[in-house]
Image (cartoon, rainbow, N blue to C red):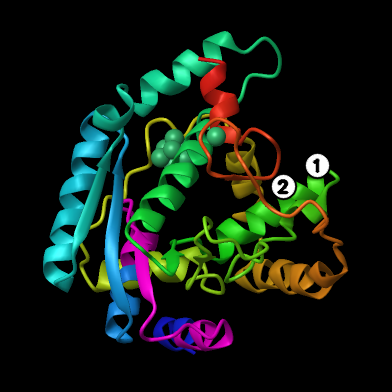
Amino acid sequence: MNIQQKVSQTLKKIKLNKKARIIVALSGGKDSTVTAYLLKKLDYNIEGLHINLGIGKYSEKCLKAVQKLCDDLKIKLHVHNIKKEMGSSMCYLRSAIQSKQKTGMLKNCAICGVIKKWIMNREARKLKADRIATGHNLDDEAQTYLMNVFKGSPELSANSGPITRNIPDKKFVPRIKPLFYVAEDDIREYSKKKKFPVVYESCPCALGSYRIEVRKFLNTISKKEKRNIIRNFEKVFSKFKKDESKGINYCEICGEPARNKICKMCLLMKTR
Ligand code: SF4
Ligand SMILES: [Zn+2]
């Protein structure tokens, strides 16, 4: 089965409606680019959202790549500039957060991930999106599942899958992952063959994360074994009991959906 067929099958599995308004989170990398290209090719109703993180030349290249892609695909692009909206670039925000932390310093990607997710949900909701599509692939998902297994908390993966399994909520835009079953090597090959405008270099801030260690390990195993990790996850995920009694809260500070009284984003901002 080729990439397009795999994606088409995944979208059927999650019953994605052709009329649904989908915001694709575009980073300028290969995964989100291939996601947007295939959704458009399969005739879904998409627009792009790019978060300009202000990471020097790297972010400038990413923005250019995303603009070119949206021009080529003839789709609308929304750009959220962190520096303009929050007063500082991601580099500054995370150094400020890290310098205030007393114990167990959070890694760059952990901080960046929380901030991006918060912005993405809020912006997609403002744009009246039905779904947010991200470029997460089979390797990313195998990494996340294994990281949770290594931490002794596989149940943390309970909400993941080709569509988020959160309790439906008017303030939460469900996220879909059309590349959930596609291996990273296949995406890279496809993207290069199609000559997409993509930034292939790694983000200069992706340093020392646990994910990188797990990725190194996963790079030593075959695609079939990676697929088996996901199969394994899908077999056991129904056994993870979700605590639905709490429902979704709204953060007391920002009003965004949160698991606890204060969302992860506001907890981070409080430590600045
Ligand atoms: S690699 Fe890490 S720091 Fe860079 S954009 Fe991604 S999450 Fe943010
Ligand atoms: Zn909040």
Asked if the stretch drawn in magenta spans residue 254, the answer is: no
Segment tinted magenta in the rendering: 8-35
The residue lying at 20 percent from left, 58 percent from top is 77
Q: CA distance from mark 1 to mark 2?
A: 6 Å
Q: Give the total number of marks visible in the rendering.
A: 2
Q: Position of residue 31 (x, y in %)?
A: 39, 61
The residue lying at 56 percent from left, 74 percent from top is 181
**In front of the other: 114 or 256:** 256
**In front of the other: 175 or 230:** 175
Q: Is residue 84 above or below residue 30?
A: above
Location of residue 140 by image quarter: bottom right
What's the residue type where badge 2 is placed?
Met
- CB of residue at label 2: within 8 Å of ligand 1? no
Q: Position of residue 250 (x, y in %)?
A: 61, 43
Residues packed near mark 2 inside 10 Å, few (<14), some (14 to 19) or many (20 plus): many
The numbered mark at residue 147 is 2
Look at the image and tell me whether residue 102 can be seen. yes
What's the residue type where badge 1 is placed?
Lys
Q: Quadrant of ligand 2?
A: top right
The numbered mark at residue 256 is none
Asked if the stretch drawn in magenta spans residue 29, the answer is: yes
Q: Is residue 77 above or below residue 58?
A: below
Label 2: which secondary element: helix
Q: Is residue 34 above or below residue 111?
A: below
Q: Give the labeled residue for mark 1.
A: 151
CB under 8 Å between discs 1 and 2 = yes
